[in-house]
Image: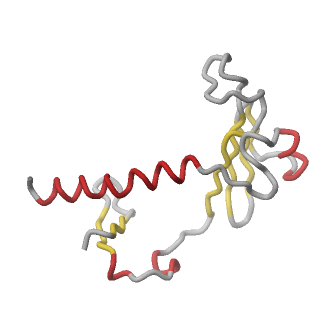
Amino acid sequence: MNSTRRFMLWTLALTFPLLLWTNTDAKEWRGIVPLKSSRADVEQLLGKPAIDRTDFASYHYNTERVSIDYSRGPCSVELSQWNVAKGIVISIWVTPVSKVLFTDLKVDQARFKKLPDYHVGTITHYVGGLW
């Protein structure tokens, strides 16, 4: 097996469990709890959203953008993945407005290999744990 393929397999093996963990951990944010809070709860806490759709809302702040997905209804409803009532929060995504630099993370850069993204020239990947 060549070194590139071995590198890719190790990267997938190390990254996949992390992705599973981060995607399944429902965290409260500013009093909003996934699978418990309703659209009314969110609007009481945050006010009216900048973007408002049936099953999605977006809030814009100076330092972050917040996207909230709502249930379309219980599993019996077409395209619904959650067995909760319509309008219940199923996910919260918080994205910083400003760039986060690798140096801001205060980690030992020597533990990571810096790799350019092959598709987007302005993106750099830092891969660790293999060296």
In the drawing, does residue 86 fall left or right of residue 22?
right
Q: Quadrant of residue 52?
A: top right
Residue 72 horizontal/vertical position (percent): 71, 26
Residue 75 horizontal/vertical position (percent): 66, 22
Residue 74 horizontal/vertical position (percent): 71, 23
In the drawing, does residue 80 fall left or right of residue 117?
right
Q: How many marks?
A: 0
Q: Is residue 86 above or below residue 2?
A: above
Q: Nearer the viewer, residue 122 or 79?
A: 79
Q: Nearer the viewer, residue 96 or 34?
A: 34
Q: Which color scheme does this rendered protein use?
A: secondary structure
Q: Quadrant of residue 37?
A: top right
Q: Residue at x 82, y 39 (%)?
A: 38
Q: Residue at x 25, y 74 (%)?
A: 131
Q: Is residue 107 above or below residue 42?
A: below
Furthest residue to the right? Answer: 44
Q: Nearer the viewer, residue 67 or 17?
A: 17
In the drawing, does residue 96 fall left or right of residue 120?
right
Q: Is residue 107 above or below residue 63?
A: below
Q: Residue at x 67, y 48 (%)?
A: 92
Q: Residue at x 51, y 52 (%)?
A: 21
Q: Nearer the viewer, residue 5 or 17?
A: 17
